[in-house]
Amino acid sequence: MNKLMAANWKMYKIYEEAKDTAEALVKLLDGKLPDGREVLVFPPFTALRGVSKKFKDEKGFWTGGQDFWPEKEGAFTGEISPGMLRDAGAAFALTGHSERRHVIGESDELVGRKTAFALASGLSVVLCVGEKIEERRSGALEAVLERQLRAGLADVPREIDPARLAVAYEPVWAIGTGEVAGPKEILGAHACVRRILLDIFENIGNDIKILYGGSVKPDNCAEIIALDNVDGVLVGGASLAAESFARIVLAGA
Ligand code: PEP
């Protein structure tokens, strides 16, 4: 299974900055992207078309939308549709990111609607799940993953092409904090996600990528990416500089 090395630029970078970073990334990885590695960048909406154009002729480079509203079109002021993301060059969409769950207030049910709608609209999806620190401390990790995955995937066809779906395990306490989960914690959570995916999708569940996200840096990525059931990473802060993200993309390859 290819490793998916994904960058979430969140609400950073105006158009020119995003294009420059994308161009620098392409140059740094020129001729170096190993077989079996793919690059995915989630820029802010205003830079999506510009970054997509920089990646257009690059094999193994993709862009995605950080969010969307699960309708084809209509009176949804301020929102953007999956069709509009595709029109701007996106192949992927992100759903269930912890900042949308816990800062914006998206429910498990809305995350599920979004995931199914994006897939039905022709986008591939990275569905994020992960526990808060108090949930981990109280022993609720597996219950949280189970709840978020079952709701997030409730309306996804059971015969989905597994290449179009990835799950990112992102413990909330490790996102943007510098506190990376240790190998034991990552192995345990990813094994749990795999078990649930197999239960939901049967054999197909083995081919759905599970990414790790939470303070991934150039210096810790090689160890993380080598762990069982880690099929890629989702990187926030350390993906904003092209040099740093290029080192992450190549880590341990
Ligand atoms: C993220 O935003 O998904 C993320 C993992 O952020 P960071 O790498 O900064 O922890």
Image (tube, rainbow, N blue to C red):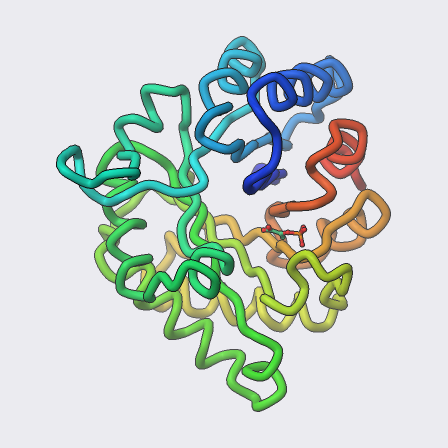
The residue lying toward the viewer, choosing from 49 and 26, is: 49
Kindly identify the residue that appears in the image at 35 percent across and 61 percent down: 106
Quarter holding the C terminus?
Answer: top right
Residue found at the far front of this picture: 77
Outermost right residue:
219
Q: Which residue reaches farthest left?
A: 74
- Confirm whether residue 4 shows in the render: no
| Residue at 27% from the left image edge and 34% from the top image edge | 81
Position in image of residue 137 (x %, y %): 62, 87
Q: Is residue 81 visible?
A: yes
Q: Position of residue 2 (x, y in %)?
A: 58, 37
How many discs mark residues in the rendered view? 0
Query: With 193 as the anchor, is 232 left or right in this view?
Result: right
Image quadrant where residue 177 sits: bottom right
Compared to residue 159, the image places residue 138 above or below, namely below
Up-down: is 17 above or below 236?
A: above
Side of 233 relative to 125 (left or right): right
User: Which quadrant holds residue 184?
Assistant: bottom right
Tell me which residue sits at (24%, 54%) in the image: 113
58 left or right of 160 in image: right
- Image point (35%, 28%), residue name: 85
Q: For residue 174, which quarter of the picture?
A: bottom right
Of all residues, the one furthest to the top in this rendering is 57
- Residue 154 in picture, x, y percent from top left: 25, 62
> Could you say where residue 89 lies in the image, as x and y percent from the top left?
41, 20
Q: Is residue 184 above or below residue 17?
A: below
Q: Of residues 45 and 243, which is closer to you in this image?
A: 45
The quarter of the image holding the N terminus is top right
**Nearer to the camera, 7 or 69:** 69
